[in-house]
Amino acid sequence: MTQEKINEQAGNQSRAQSSAQSSTELEALVAGTPENTATDHTSEVAIAETSHEVTVHEITYQDVQTKMALRHPRAQIDALLQQAIAQEQANYDAVHAQWLVEVAQTQALIDTAVAHNATNPDEPLVVPELPNEPVIDLALRRACYKSEHVAVDLALATEAEPAKVVFDDDALITYHHPATEAHSAEHIEQVKRERFKAQRAIDVAAITVEVEGLVFDGDETAQTRMARAAVVMDDTESVSWVLADNSQTSVNKAQLVAACKAAGLEQTRFWMNDL
């Protein structure tokens, strides 16, 4: 080997050593600890393996949004959403594991810097800050939840509440609550009364009664017609009548009187069933 080659190799070795020594004094103090080296290597291998697993068949929330836009069945959307959430959690676990390693490394640097600064006030080292813990941004997954509007009887509300959205992260549902007003007891009582009267009118209009196998309409108009017909009929006379099912038959005075009486009793029951 020529002297020139020997000098070149010696120069390369010198430069390599200088490069290794150019690391900061603080990192050299920590990196030289065998326990830290072994721990970091094991953690890095575990993180690498985990990261490799979660990159397989990656599903994004955009895929879920596409299914929603195409109006796929909700069951299919929820199934894909569950997969996306599971993969996001796996990715987060890998990042969180890396964060734990970085925290341990940074804490060692902090301890070393603090100890150094305590004994070398004239040559202080910069004390690093711990890295921020990673978090999952739930906004993306929540945008894929099933939406449900909460039914609230606004006319009977007793408290004023602004409209709000509540996320059920277990059921994967977004609940939309409407804004409400605070109503007085008098207002609520009046609303209930008006509703009762409206329902009563519906019930009376739907009255039917059965006499001798014949089903008659029993609303107020039908009662008036039956009473008017019965008044002018003889006891043995019959008249054509349209029943509740719109079929036409012949009825006598006794049947009309019985039907009118039964309908009147049913209407009285509705009217007496007050608040």
Image: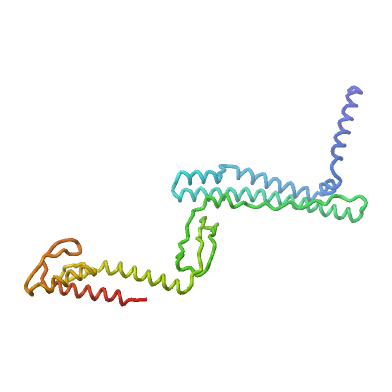
- Considering only vertical position in the picture, is 7 above or below 253? above
Residue that sits furthest to the left in the current view: 236
Q: Position of residue 4 (x, y in %)?
A: 90, 23
Frontmost residue, 231 versus 13: 231
Q: Residue at x 51, y 61 (%)?
A: 179
The answer to whether residue 193 is left or right of residue 41 is: left
Q: Residue at x 8, y 69 (%)?
A: 238
Q: Position of residue 150 (x, y in %)?
A: 47, 60
The answer to whether residue 56 is left or right of residue 22 is: left
The answer to whether residue 106 is left or right of residue 263 is: right
Quadrant of the rendered image containing residue 198: bottom left
Q: Which quadrant holds the N terminus?
A: top right
Q: Position of residue 118 (x, y in %)?
A: 89, 56
Q: Which quadrant holds the C terminus?
A: bottom left
Residue that sits furthest to the right in the current view: 122
Q: Position of residue 241 (x, y in %)?
A: 14, 65
Q: Residue at x 62, y 48 (%)?
A: 91
Frontmost residue, 39 versus 143: 143
The answer to whether residue 267 is left or right of residue 81 is: left
User: Looking at the image, how many numbered discs can be counted on the residues?
Assistant: 0
Residue that sits furthest to the top in the current view: 2
Q: Residue at x 67, y 47 (%)?
A: 47
Q: How is the image coloured?
A: rainbow
- Considering only vertical position in the picture, is 235 above or below 20? below
- Considering only vertical position in the picture, is 199 above or below 137? below
